[in-house]
Image (cartoon, grey):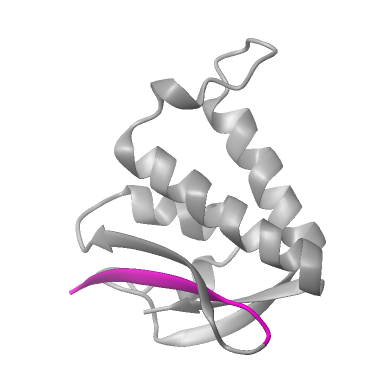
């Protein structure tokens, strides 16, 4: 068991992927950043997809930066843990797609 969270563009191509073991608390951070806690089932996602607008993904990125920016004006990505980088990469990949297509679909498995 574990959390496999995948982002897809409008034609169904996978554009983002994040993987967390069932006991990894960092999975909850990604669910919360996406305001998608209803898709969290403890040891995994619920096996459902939803669509996020560009604005929703931008909000997730802004909240992420608030959480992990140490107060300096420059974002310090090199100081992040592996899971923090995985979350950031996932959000950035989803944002790139949402900027082109106005939305992105995310599967929580």
Apparent side of residue 86 relative to residue 9 in the rendered image (left or right): left
Image spot of residue 83 (x, y percent): 34, 43
Indicate whether residue 98 is drawn in magenta.
no
Q: Quadrant of residue 80?
A: top left
Image point (68%, 85%), residue name: 10
In the image, the segment drawn in magenta is 1-10
Q: Is residue 18 above or below residue 43?
A: above
Q: Quadrant of residue 1?
A: bottom left
Instruction: Specify the farthest residue to the top.
Output: 72
Dominant secondary structure (helix, strand or loop) of the stretch shown in magenta: strand
Image point (65%, 40%), residue name: 63
The total number of labels drawn is 0
Image point (34%, 71%), residue name: 4
Apparent side of residue 36 relative to residue 23 in the rendered image (left or right): right
Apparent side of residue 1 relative to residue 81 in the rendered image (left or right): left
Indicate whether residue 6 is drawn in magenta.
yes
Image point (49%, 60%), residue name: 31
Image spot of residue 77 (x, y percent): 49, 27
Image spot of residue 71 (x, y percent): 62, 12
Viewer-closest of 95 and 107: 95
Quadrant where the C terminus sits is bottom left
Image spot of residue 59 (x, y percent): 73, 50
Q: Is residue 8 above or below residue 72?
A: below
């Amino acid at each position: 068991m574990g959390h496999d969270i995948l982002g897809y563009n409008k034609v169904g191509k996978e554009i983002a992927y994040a993987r967390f073991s069932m006991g990894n608390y960092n999975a909850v951070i990604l669910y919360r950043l996406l305001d998608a806690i209803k898709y969290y089932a403890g040891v995994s996602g619920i096996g459902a997809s939803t669509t996020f607008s560009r604005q929703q993904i931008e909000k997730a990125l802004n909240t992420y930066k608030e959480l992990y920016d140490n107060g300096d004006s420059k974002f310090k990505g090199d100081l992040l843990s592996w899971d923090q980088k995985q979350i950031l990469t996932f959000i950035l990949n989803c944002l790139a797609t949402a900027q082109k297509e106005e939305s992105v679909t995310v599967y929580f498995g």
